[in-house]
Image (cartoon, rainbow, N blue to C red):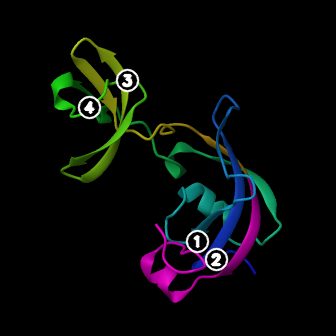
Amino acid sequence: MKIDKHKVVSIEYTLKGPDGEIVDRSDDGEPLDYLHGAGNIVPGLEQALQGKAAGEAFHIDVPPEMGYGPRVEELRLVLPRDRFQTAGELATGMRFRASTPDGSQVFTIVGIAGDDVTIDANHPLAGETLHFDVKVVDVRDARQEEIEHGHVHGPDGHHA
């Protein structure tokens, strides 16, 4: 069966950054399952998977505009420390979710200087070319409920 819209696809993958260091990978023995055509993975990888079948393996370099997009400097802000409601100490690298006029957004603390906290809402890989090594493990027809919900469900039904 070939990968096409409304197919559930299981892939094993390794993602490397521009320096060749492994940034992410599927868990050993636990492939990533996604619903093809539902925007569950970066567009460049989804396009490269179109038409492939179980057993196929390949390498793809995904440019920023087909990955996590370009870096947007306006998404980097300096806020006063008292704007953060946390019980613990703030530290560089901490990630948190906040409500914005555009909906919920994830921010990363990228710097702390005195009472100034610099946050960045860009995806950590924004502006980077993504280097994927991928193997297609399985392809199946999606169930109607998965198509309606826009994501894969577990064998016993819905999961987050």
For the residue labelled by badge 2, is the local secondary structure a helix, a strand or a loop?
loop
The mark nearer the N terminus, 2 or 1, is: 2
Q: Identify which residue is drawn at 23% across, 18% down.
A: 116
- In front of the other: 130 or 124: 124
Location of mark 4 (residue): 87
Residue 4's mark? 2
Q: What amino acid is found at the position of numbered circle 4 in the picture?
A: Ala
Q: Identify which residue is drawn at 75% across, 81% down.
A: 1
Q: Answer whether residue 159 is magenta in the image.
A: yes
For the residue labelled by badge 3, is the local secondary structure a helix, a strand or a loop?
loop
Vertical comparison of 3 with 107: above or below = below
Q: What amino acid is found at the position of numbered circle 3 in the picture?
A: Ala
The mark nearer the N terminus, 3 or 2, is: 2
Q: What amino acid is found at the position of numbered circle 1 in the picture?
A: His
Rounded to the nearest whole Å, what is the CA distance between mark 2 and mark 1?
Answer: 6 Å
Q: Is residue 70 left or right of residue 55?
A: left
Q: Is residue 55 left or right of residue 114?
A: right
Residue 91's mark? 3
Is there CB contact under 8 Å for labels 2 and 1? yes
- In front of the other: 27 or 73: 27
Instruction: Name the spot of residue 131 as percent of width and height, x first.
Output: 67, 43
Identify the residue at the far right of this view: 55
Q: Identify which residue is drawn at 36% across, 20% down.
A: 111
Rounded to the nearest whole Å, what is the CA distance between mark 3 and mark 2?
Answer: 43 Å
Rounded to the nearest whole Å, what is the CA distance between mark 3 and mark 1?
Answer: 37 Å
Estimate how packed mark 2 is, as few (under 14), some (14 to 19) or many (20 or more) residues with alpha carbons within 10 Å.
many
Identify the residue at the far top of this view: 114
Instruction: Name the spot of residue 14 as percent of width and height, x first.
Output: 70, 47
Vertical comparison of 8 with 120: above or below = below
Instruction: Name the spot of residue 127 as percent of width and height, x first.
Output: 49, 37
Instruction: Name the spot of residue 19 as percent of width and height, x first.
Output: 67, 28
Residue 36's mark? 1
